[in-house]
Image (spheres, rainbow, N blue to C red):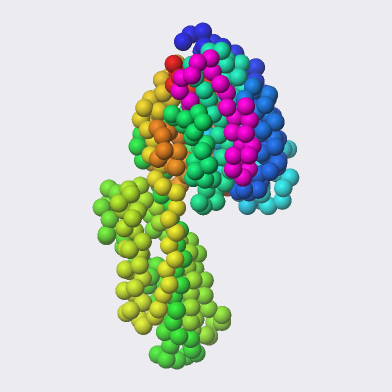
């Protein structure tokens, strides 16, 4: 496809500044999950410039753009998440957040600009398309149960039926000008839980008359680490974490209750189903030993994100032809973060590439959800071109 390749590279150059401008515009007005009203209006208006048929009524604050090709071939979806985080920005950007206490610290502003950029490019190549393209702007990725599940339930993969979905996520561990790919399990199932320990209060000088909830909780925290170290095959990755613990009222009063919050993350469905039982068995055993009571509230998170190799192979072929084979990094391990893109991977062949945005010279090296999170914006038009080329290959 030498002719298409040169056209895409030319359009990347032509529309790149507009993509970066859109990213900066969105970055200034971050909105939390299901509150993306300004973002929805902005994306809907910009999609109309591309020749897409726009639907901003499918579900909540989502926006869908449909670009019809020259023939009734397959339909390819491209997904971008829309929501920001409850975080105060510390980037020093001249286009920093104007919404107090909210920030695009996970890169969703970039995702939207990239997917819109792909729509802009493909809109000018509409006569070359052997099918249709759906541009899926999905709200509420950061807030369980996420927006993907409900968008799918409301028909985003129908009319016309979507055959494949491309996803992406910026990654500051990967240099700009490269993508990271992994087949199979790519991101974990991130479950959350609350543990309440109930003891019996009393004076700190007479501990034998009490049931010390703090001491029981400390034993629970320690015992839970045995799940990863002694109860699960060491080759099967699992994380069991207590992220918050609080209880008690004074230095000389033994606490009658302690509340803990934690997360469990796995890459294996069978193990994910067993983890709640393993956690409860440990809590019950510790509490029985010391005469305490407990309450466990366990919430299943997003499913495991499973990348389809055939979709990744399109990424591999496309980036190799467009930017060179050295632009692909084969990732040897998944990450233990979670993504509701997993619902798309369950429904149709789908894959999420990790887009390199790292540039230490400009401070684009902070992790996701950091208040100084930055990206190298050169990745935006670069990735839009890659998505556009991948779609054309998928439809050919």
Judging depth in this view, the residue of 114 and 234 nearest the camera is 114
Q: Residue at x 66, y 34 (%)?
A: 43
Asked which quadrant contains residue 335, the reply is: top left
Instruction: Write the start and end of the magenta stretch as one range.
Output: 53-76
Image height check: is 37 above or below 46? below
Q: Is residue 70 magenta?
A: yes
Which residue sits at x=56%, y=80%?
249
Task: Find the residue positioned furthest to the front.
Answer: 159
What's the residue at 36%, 71% (across, down)? 283
Expressed as whole percent of the image width and height from the top left, the position of residue 4 reads 52, 11
Is residue 294 visible in the rendered structure shown here?
Answer: yes
x, y (%) of residue 354? Answer: 47, 34
Q: In the rendered view, would you say 372 is above or below 168?
A: below
The answer to whether one can see residue 359 in this image is no
Of 167 and 126, nearer the camera is 126
Placement of 70 over or under 44, stated as above or below: above
Q: Residue at x 42, y 68 (%)?
A: 296
User: Which of these two is toward me, 182 or 378?
Assistant: 182
Residue 33 drawn above or below residue 43: below
Residue 250 found in image quarter? bottom right
Q: How many marks?
A: 0
Give the percent coordinates (x, y) of residue 240.
Answer: 39, 58
The quadrant in which the C terminus is found is top left
The image position of residue 109, as x and y in percent, is 62, 37
Q: Is residue 339 left or right of residue 35?
A: left
Q: Quadrant of residue 185?
A: top left
């Amino acid at each position: 496809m030498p002719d298409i390749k040169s056209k895409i590279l030319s359009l990347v150059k032509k529309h790149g500044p507009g993509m970066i401008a859109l990213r900066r515009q969105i970055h200034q007005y971050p909105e939390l999950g299901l509150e993306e009203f300004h973002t929805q209006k902005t994306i809907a208006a910009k999609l109309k410039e591309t020749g897409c048929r726009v639907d901003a009524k499918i579900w909540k604050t989502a926006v869908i753009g449909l670009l019809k090709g020259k023939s009734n071939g397959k339909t390819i979806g491209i997904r971008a998440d829309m929501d920001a985080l409850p975080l105060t920005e510390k980037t020093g950007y001249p286009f920093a957040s104007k919404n107090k206490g909210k920030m695009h610290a996970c890169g969703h502003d970039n995702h939207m600009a990239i997917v819109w950029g792909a729509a802009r490019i493909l809109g000018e190549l509409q006569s070359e398309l052997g099918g249709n393209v759906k541009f899926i702007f999905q709200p509420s990725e950061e807030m369980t149960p996420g927006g993907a599940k409900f968008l799918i339930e409301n028909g985003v993969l129908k009319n016309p039926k979507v055959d494949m979905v491309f996803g992406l996520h910026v990654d500051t561990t990967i240099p700009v000008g490269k993508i990271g790919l992994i087949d199979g399990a790519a991101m974990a199932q991130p479950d959350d839980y609350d543990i309440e320990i109930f003891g019996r209060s009393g004076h700190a000088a007479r501990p034998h008359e009490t049931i010390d909830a703090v001491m029981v909780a400390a034993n629970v925290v320690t015992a839970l680490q045995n799940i990863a170290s002694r109860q699960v095959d060491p080759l099967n990755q699992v994380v069991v974490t207590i992220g918050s613990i609080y209880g008690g009222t004074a230095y000389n009063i033994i606490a009658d209750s302690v509340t803990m919050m934690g997360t469990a993350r796995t890459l294996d469905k069978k193990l994910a189903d067993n983890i709640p039982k393993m956690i409860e068995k440990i809590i019950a055993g510790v509490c029985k030993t010391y005469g305490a009571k407990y309450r466990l509230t366990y919430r299943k998170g997003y499913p495991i994100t499973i990348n389809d190799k055939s979709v990744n192979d399109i990424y591999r072929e496309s980036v190799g032809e467009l930017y060179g084979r050295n632009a692909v990094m084969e990732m040897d391990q998944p990450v233990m973060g979670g993504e509701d893109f997993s619902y798309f991977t369950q429904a149709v062949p789908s894959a999420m590439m990790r887009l390199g945005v790292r540039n230490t010279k400009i401070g684009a090296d902070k992790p996701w959800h950091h208040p100084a999170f930055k990206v190298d914006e050169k990745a935006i038009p670069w990735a839009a071109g890659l998505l556009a080329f991948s779609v054309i290959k998928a439809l050919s």
